[in-house]
Amino acid sequence: MMADNRIYYPQRPIGLPNSSAPTPGKQSTAPVQGGSSFGQVLEQYLTDIKFSQHALQRLQSRNIQLNQTELVKLNSAVEKAARKGAKESLILMDNLALVVSIRNKTVITAIDGASIKENVFTNIDSAVIV
């Protein structure tokens, strides 16, 4: 049985820096300043997958664009791999392969469907198919 070594931080509200504390019982329906709605800020807070510079270059050179649904799938796959103790994982999604550092929640590289068959994936300890 593996010990749970995760660190849990107390929950705290997401707010803007230098904003005054909300009055209890009053709710603001105005969007967050800077053009981001609460949902967008929350989504960014919950989806903390990062992309290395190499991965960003691969995505751009191979004309790969991830939509919000794919990012949610990717985040879910990373969480599943983390629960199993994975360190470096190959994540296969639709017509895309991503090598991800599970510890850092960072995409290391991305390969499109046409190139998947031509590659050998090394330095991975797990694979997640979504």
Image (cartoon, rainbow, N blue to C red):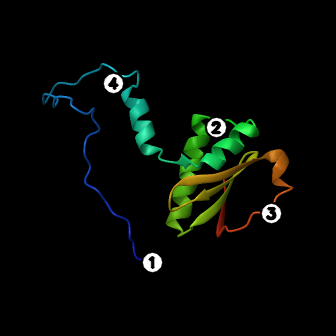
Mark 3 vs mark 2: which is more N-terminal?
Answer: 2
Residue, far left: 24
Q: Residues within 10 Å of mark 1 (few under 14, many from 20)?
A: few
* Residue 126 vertical position relative to residue 42 in the rendered view, above or below: below
Q: Amino acid at mark 3?
A: Val
Q: Nearer the viewer, residue 77 or 55?
A: 55
Mark 4 vs mark 3: which is more N-terminal?
Answer: 4
Q: Residues within 10 Å of mark 2 (few under 14, many from 20)?
A: few
Q: Amino acid at mark 1?
A: Met
User: Residue sitting at 16 percent across and 31 percent down?
Assistant: 21
The CA span between labels 4 and 1 is 41 Å
Where residue 25 appears, as percent x and y from the top left, is 14, 28
Where residue 70 appears, as percent x and y from the top left, is 62, 41
Left or right: where does residue 118 sit relative to residue 5?
A: right
Which residue is labeled 1 in the image? 2
Mark 2 vs mark 4: which is more N-terminal?
Answer: 4
User: Residue sitting at 55 percent across and 56 percent down?
Assistant: 78
Q: Residues within 10 Å of mark 3 (few under 14, many from 20)?
A: few
Where residue 8 appears, as percent x and y from the top left, is 31, 60
Which residue is labeled 3 in the image? 120
Which residue is labeled 2 in the image? 66
Locate the N terminus by quadrant: bottom left
Q: Amino acid at mark 4?
A: Val
Mark 2 vs mark 1: which is more N-terminal?
Answer: 1
* Residue 119 vertical position relative to residue 12 in the rendered view, above or below: below
Which residue is labeled 4 in the image? 32
State which mark lies toward you, 4 or 1. 4
Left or right: where does residue 111 sit relative to residue 20?
A: right
